[in-house]
Image (cartoon, rainbow, N blue to C red):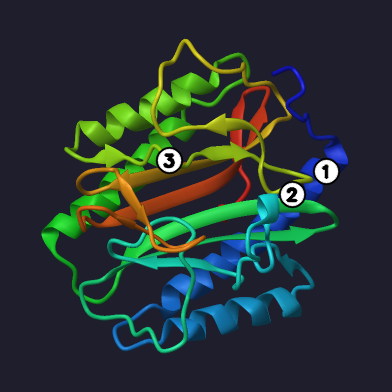
Amino acid sequence: MSNIPIKTTIEIEIMRRNGQKLAKFMEILKNMIRPGLDVWVLEQKFIDLCLENKVIPACKGYAPGGLAPFPTGLCLSINDQSVHCYPVKGTILKDGDIVNIDTVIMDLGLHVDSAFACGVGSISKENRSLLKASEDALYTAIDKIRSGIKIGLLSETMEMSVKKCGYNVLQEYAGHGIGRQMHEIPEIPCFGNSNFGPIIKDGMVLAVESLVCEKNSRLVHNSVWVTKTADGGNFVQFEHTVLVTKNGYEILTKI
């Protein structure tokens, strides 16, 4: 996969600026989450932030491969809902829920992608453990990034980190390259072997995501976009857009 895009200095600077904007948006949204909140308020706030900051909410209208256009700016899932669910007006967050928010913004033709999960109000010890396992897996994998390693090392690291906590990684979806397109090569699964995959090089930008299921990782597809875990176990997602540098990495979507 020698055709994995290497970003120019100008492209990197634009993505860095976009990443800082998205990081601030996500912090604002996270601070709004509470029991009794209609999730549509989060969608409205995100769209307002994009308008105020003159960036495009890239998920809204996204229609790869002729799929029905994605209806909202945010991907938002609760508890056993999985990736690519979306906020529906009238859905109220309850004490003890887990909520995942994943989104992409674009400006000057370049995308950045980030996701976080958090508890709503007072959550159980089990849910706190699940949240920590997914977030730890993401940062443990990111910390392996350096020019010259294979993508498989990130995949293996995430899988091992999650499994030692007693959970499973989602296998139907994966992280990815990002830049001019929302989804670029390479694919970055949450499972794998360190000896496989393309070699990471300085100047690549990767959307690394930890996709963790409390129980079995099999999904049920309720519609084109809406997925849930087949066994009703909770799902937790964390993601950052990461630049590969000569000396390691830079997380572009973290303040």
Disc 2 designates what residue?
A: 15
Tag shown at residue 11: 1
Q: Dot 2, how many residues are within 10 Å of its Cα: few (below 14), some (14-19), or many (20+)? A: many
Which percent across, then down, holds residue 63?
A: 68, 59
User: Mark 1: few, some, or many residues within 10 Å (few <14, many ≥20)?
Assistant: some
Q: Real-space Cα distance between discs 1 and 2?
A: 6 Å
Task: Give the mark nearest the N terminus, 3 or 1.
Answer: 1
- Against 186, is 94 above or below? below
- Which residue occupies the foreground of this view, 220 or 33? 220
The part of the image, by quadrant, that contains residue 9 is: top right
Relative vertical location of residue 91 with respect to residue 70 in this rendering, above or below: below
Question: As drawn, is 97 to the left or to the right of 108?
Answer: left
Q: Is residue 60 left or right of 140 when viewed as pictured?
A: right
Quick check: 114 above or below 210?
A: below
Q: Earlier in the sequence, mark 2 or mark 3?
A: 2
**Tag 1 and tag 2, C-beta contact below 8 Å:** yes
What's the amino acid at mark 3?
Glu
Left or right of residue 134, residue 231 in this image: left
Which amino acid type is marked by label 2? Met
| Residue 106 in the figure: left or right of residue 86 | right
Q: Of discs 2 and 3, which sits in the foreground?
A: 3
Q: Position of residue 118 (x, y in %)?
A: 34, 64
The three-letter code of the residue at mark 1 reads Glu
Element under disc 2: helix
Give the structural element (helix, strand or loop) at label 3.
Answer: loop
Q: Quadrant of residue 100?
A: bottom left
Residue that badge 3 annotates: 172
